Amino acid sequence: MSQRKYDRTRGQHWNSECERAVSIALTHALTIAITTVLLSGLLVASGPFLESQEQRVADDQLDEIVNHAASQVAALDSHAEGNGDVEMSVTLNYPRTVVDQYSYTVELEEDGGDAVVTVRTAGLDRESSITLETEAGIEPSQTDGSVVELSLCQDENEITLSGCDT
């Protein structure tokens, strides 16, 4: 026979043998379930945020590289304007990857007499370009990132990424 006691705080009778043990186990189980659901929701919701953050960082890094490369193309072009017999090269060192894992290429193209410098990463399907007015010709070329050699070639009066033929 179970003994029923009166609980003054609740104002009711309760069975001391079974109700209390079930209540504690049920409370713990519900707490764990609710915590698990909340943490799972937090992890699922943070996924798109991290992806968009990665794309913003990649865009910033590509913009920084293309701006620096374009300024060096402009500097080589200024040397070509004054002297037709100058040959020079500039070696640019950049990080091997953007966002610590995606390789990229640096491209130099000519578009209607203007130079177009493009930095592109296939892994994120991102690119950044700058168009410059140049006096020197542009030899279309491309190279993988990291070490980029820009050259102003005397014979053709061209700027290239592939070095001069001497």
Image (tube, helix red, strand yellow):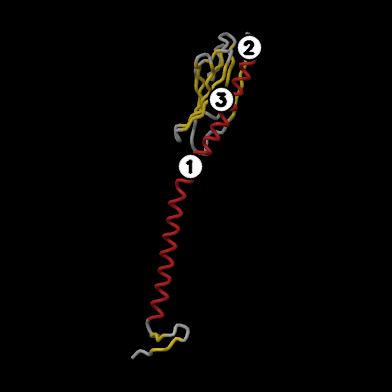
Residue 102 drawn at (x, y percent): 48, 36
**Which residue is denoted by mark 3 in the rendering?**
148
**Which residue is denoted by mark 2 in the rendering?**
81
Element at label 2? helix
Amino acid type at mark 1: Ser
Q: In which quarter of the image is the N terminus?
A: bottom left
For this rendering, which residue is in front, 107 or 110? 110
Count of marks overlaid on the render: 3
For this rendering, which residue is in front, 165 or 99? 99
Residue in the image at 50% along x and 41% along y? 54
Q: Nearer the viewer, mark 2 or mark 3?
A: 2
- Position of 29 with respect to 86 (left or right) is left
- Position of 144 with respect to 29 (left or right) is right
Amino acid type at mark 2: Glu
Q: Do the residues labelled 2 and 1 touch (CB within 8 Å)?
A: no
For this rendering, which residue is in front, 156 or 20? 20
Element at label 1? helix
Label 2, label 1: how far apart the Cα atoms are: 43 Å
**Which residue is denoted by mark 1 in the rendering?**
52
Residue 36 drawn at (x, y percent): 42, 61
